[in-house]
Image (spheres, rainbow, N blue to C red):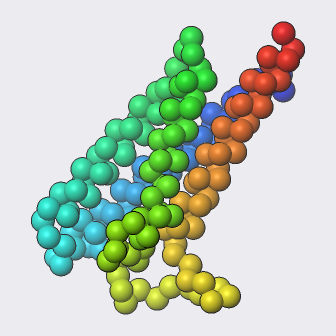
Amino acid sequence: MVNTMSKEKLSRILLSVVIVNTAVVSVAVDWNASHIFNPTWVPHARFHDVVMLWLLSSLSVIALWLLWRRSAEPQVSTIIATLVPMLFWAPFFFTTLLVPGTSLSASPDEPLPVIAGITIYPNVVIATINEILAAISYWLYSSQKENSTRNI
């Protein structure tokens, strides 16, 4: 029973870190001259970035509340809390393929590392880490629930 409880708590803590990191990093990266206060951006683009950050921050608070509240359906709460950061970071992997003219780089002059001929975008690295950590946290939660079901 102690092992089961520790897996659930570890899952919640790890997912909480991912949720908070997603909101805080996104605001920190966008709330500056390269994004929201970029004079080359049209005002409506800046408006949409602020709306996106507000929505992300609000959903992150809801996700944390769902994750830590007492619930008759904790699996539903955990799934929704996991989906918030996963759905936020997912477009970093396909948006440039869907919308011509978009870029993963905030500045065309920004020097980016290249490893084995592959350009490494810092935001994609952060997205990948958060996606993996969210998946691990859900796996921990699910494996704990499977073990407790088998013990009944």
137 is higher (above) or lower (below) than 113: above
Snapshot quadrant of residue 138: top right
| Residue 102 appears left or right of 74 | left
For the N terminus, the image quarter is top right
Give the farthest residue toward the right. 151
Residue 7 visible in the displayed image: no
Above or below, 97 relative to 81: below
Residue 104 lies, in percent from the top left, at 42, 73
- Residue 11 in the image, given as x and y percentages of width and height: 68, 36
Examine the rendering and report whether any part of residue 119 can be seen: yes
Left or right: 6 with respect to 94?
A: right
Residue 22 relative to residue 41: left or right: right
- Which residue appears at 51% of the width and 75% of the height? 121
Residue 30 locus on image (x, y percent) = 33, 63
Residue at the spot x=18%, y=78% of the render?
40
Q: Which image quarter is the C terminus in?
A: top right
Quarter of the figure with residue 140:
top right
Instruction: Please report the residue visible at 60 percent of the width from the left and 84 percent of the height from the top.
Output: 118
Identify whether 135 is placed above or below 8: below
Among all residues in the image, which is located at the extreme left? 43
Residue found 72% across the figure and 31% down from its top: 142
Residue 99 rendering spot, x and y as whole percentages: 34, 68
Viewer-side residue, 34 vs 118 = 118
Count the numbered circles shown.
0
